[in-house]
Image (cartoon, grey):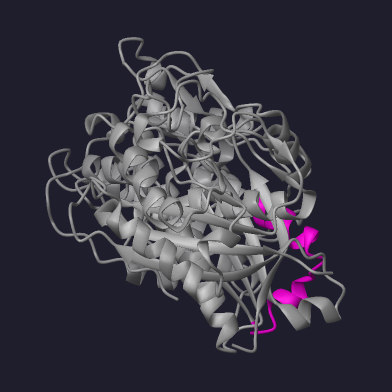
Amino acid sequence: MSRSAVVTGLGFITSIGNDRAAVTASLRALRGGIERVEFVGNAALPVKVAGTVKEFTVDSASWRDWRMPSRYEIPRETLRGLAPHGVYAVCAADQAIADAGLTREDLTDGETGLYCASAGSAFLLHHNLTQMHAARFERGNPLGVVMSIAGTLNFNLAAHYGIRGAVGGFAAACASSSHALGCALDDIRLGRQTRMLIVGAEEMNAETILPFAAMRALSTNPDPATASRPFDQARDGFVGAGGAVCLILEEAETARRRGAPIYAELAGWGQAADGYNVAVSHPEGAGLAAAIQRALADAGVAPAAIDYVNAHATSTPAGDRSEALALRTVFTAAGARPRVSSTKGLTGHPLSMAGVMEAAFCALALRDGFIPGNGNLIQPDEACAGLHLPRATLDGAPRLVLNNSSGFGGSNVCHVLRRAEN
Amino acid sequence: MSPAMSPPPATAATPAPSPTAAEALIRHFPAGVHAAYVRLRDTGDPAAADTLVLAIVADHVPQKGRALADTHELVADLGFDSVAISEVVFFLEDLLQVRVTNAEILRVRTIGDLRAFVRTKLAASAAAPASTVRA
């Protein structure tokens, strides 16, 4: 494979920070972004916490009511077609584009593509359809479709930034943005694109988060400090979160030639499905283990070479156990003992955006020389026997890291990132 | 790209918006526009409709900061695209409880055309028996 790809830009709107510096500081200090919330003003709901997005007010169905930090300017032509999480996405992409030192001309050169992941806006879909029902479907918001269905991010961001290369969206629930990142790597390796923007975003509102309570997948622990505790014996479900992350992936020689900042190399990826259940992970983590092995093979590295694993672990009893067993299958069995942490103890679980967010965290760890610890972990589940789960953040630069993601239908996607040799 | 809009079927009338819903639609507009809406609602004053139309066009115009005149063409002079025109039509339909067909939209080129169109639409709506479809 002659062409390789490097990460050259990052942008964050997350529960633990709205820029790279804030996110890095939170990861290093294990400062969480989970807060008490009262969804729809209903104190009787058992779900009491969420990974909130600060500085933004986007809880109205009308863009005219939205407020965002003054450092962002989104024109009316763009705002009118956005969902609330689209606002986060534009702000994260603006950050990443500036971080990578790219111009508008760079984005519109046809060599630049855009892959996105979100579940769409259940909030606006419900609002718009309710409005149409009330009008007996005789009228409706002309932008109701593009602002609400899955694909809203790629529709809007492609138009806003004038992207003329590959554009598409990925829908694999919590593995979606990991698929986006992997396919972006393939496009660069195959010479189809020189540069890809990968964006994941989700809303933090009742319509996006609370349907998971109906599945009994959300934590009902009311304490923000302990509700999300991946791998812990006392975990009782995940904590929903919103936000957006943009990662810019660029062909390595092009990036070096233009003097772009290089965070890390995306060295390989792999995917494998469980073929088991629509919503429950394989009990032994078989699909995830296969995805890890494929990612390692694609990157050409042995299990023992991996220094750190950013786990998908969301704090659900079944999912975390499955992932722990998958890690033991690949690493413990090979005599390897990488450090393993799930940053969702800090961030909560932002669904489709989790994969690209955590790949971005890995890129920060590789460049800045640290390994995030396991926030909120007190007593590891016995399924984690033999795994190295540091509580505290560790100093020291990892050389190779693995990023895991899993989604509904048993989709499992893994990335291998390598420290850049500048 | 043209927005997909179909002529309305001849079905029962949609309910008129509550005062609260109408007020919510124009809550971002200046007080004078609110007053015009109330005057139109209570008296049917066509001049009040003109004020509303101008305010709605100004709110949706892509090229901000320029004075609007009846002779301005929505597309050629003011930069409206088909989606922005559809937004204006949707706003008017929702606020005034009228229905607008694709063919009617295509005949509107200028702000003056739009003002005249809305006056005609409201007059037809007022003349229709309460039990039939409005305009």
Left or right of A286? Residue A83 is right
Quadrant containing the C terminus of chain A in the rendered view: bottom right
Residue in the foreground of this view, choosing between A189 and B120 = A189
Residue furthest to the right: A259
Residue furthest to the top: A43
Q: Quadrant of residue B21?
A: top left
Residue in the foreground of this view, choosing between A213 and B57 = A213
Quadrant containing the N terminus of chain A in the rendered view: bottom right
Q: Is residue B13 above or below residue A249?
A: above
Please name the residue shown 44% across and 48% down the image. B91
State the image coordinates of residue A55 (x, y, percent, origin top left).
67, 31
Q: Which residues are magenta?
A: A92-111
Residue A289 colored magenta?
no
Main structural element of the magenta stretch: helix, strand or loop?
A: helix
Tell me if residue A3 can be seen: yes
Please name the residue shown 76% across and 57% down the image. B66
State the image coordinates of residue A221 (x, y, percent, origin top left).
39, 16
Q: Is residue A89 above or below residue A392?
A: below
State the image coordinates of residue A98 (x, y, percent, origin top left).
79, 59
Residue in the foreground of this view, choosing between A164 and A215 = A215
Tell me if residue B108 can be seen: no
Left or right of A130? Residue A177 is right
Residue in the foreground of this view, choosing between B20 and A352 = A352
Residue A101 colored magenta?
yes
Please name the residue shown 37% across and 46% down the image. A323
